[in-house]
Image: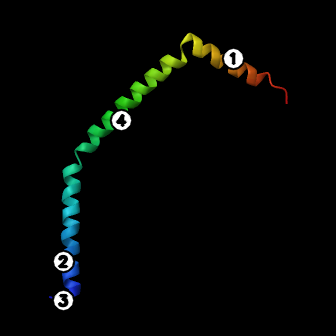
């Protein structure tokens, strides 16, 4: 068997192993996506609670008010 043939055989074997490994991992994508969505929703909920709290809301309104009152 020539060197070029051995290289092609090894390349094909490597491609088969990579494809098999990718098929084994395919089911995890959905669960990882779901966990990411849950984490994003939890973070958004906490951020919403912080931003709508009285003290933070007042500070944000003060910042906007000062930004709008600036003379150009």
- The quadrant of the rendering that contains the N terminus is bottom left
Q: Which sits earlier in the primary sequence, circle 2 or circle 4?
A: 2
- Assess disc 2: are there few (<14), some (14-19) or many (≥20) residues with their C-alpha within 10 Å of its C-alpha: few
Residue 26 position in % (x across, y down): 24, 48
Q: Which sits earlier in the primary sequence, circle 4 or circle 3?
A: 3
Query: Mark 3 — residue?
Result: 2
**Label 1, label 3: how many angstroms apart (C-alpha)?**
78 Å
At 28% from the left and 44% from the top, the residue drawn is 29
Query: Mark 1 — residue?
Result: 62
Contact flag, marks 4 and 3 (Cβ < 8 Å)? no
Residue 39 position in % (x across, y down): 37, 30
Compared to residue 36, the image places residue 50 above or below, namely above
Contact flag, marks 1 and 2 (Cβ < 8 Å)? no
Contact flag, marks 3 and 2 (Cβ < 8 Å)? no
Marker disc for residue 23: none
Query: Mark 4 — residue?
Result: 36
């Amino acid at each position: 068997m020539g060197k070029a043939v051995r290289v092609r055989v090894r390349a094909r074997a490597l491609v088969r192993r990579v494809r098999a490994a990718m098929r084994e991992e395919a089911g995890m994508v959905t669960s990882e996506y779901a966990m990411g969505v849950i984490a994003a929703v939890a973070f958004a909920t906490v951020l919403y609670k912080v931003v709508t709290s009285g003290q933070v809301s007042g500070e944000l309104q003060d910042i906007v008010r000062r930004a709008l009152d600036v003379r150009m």
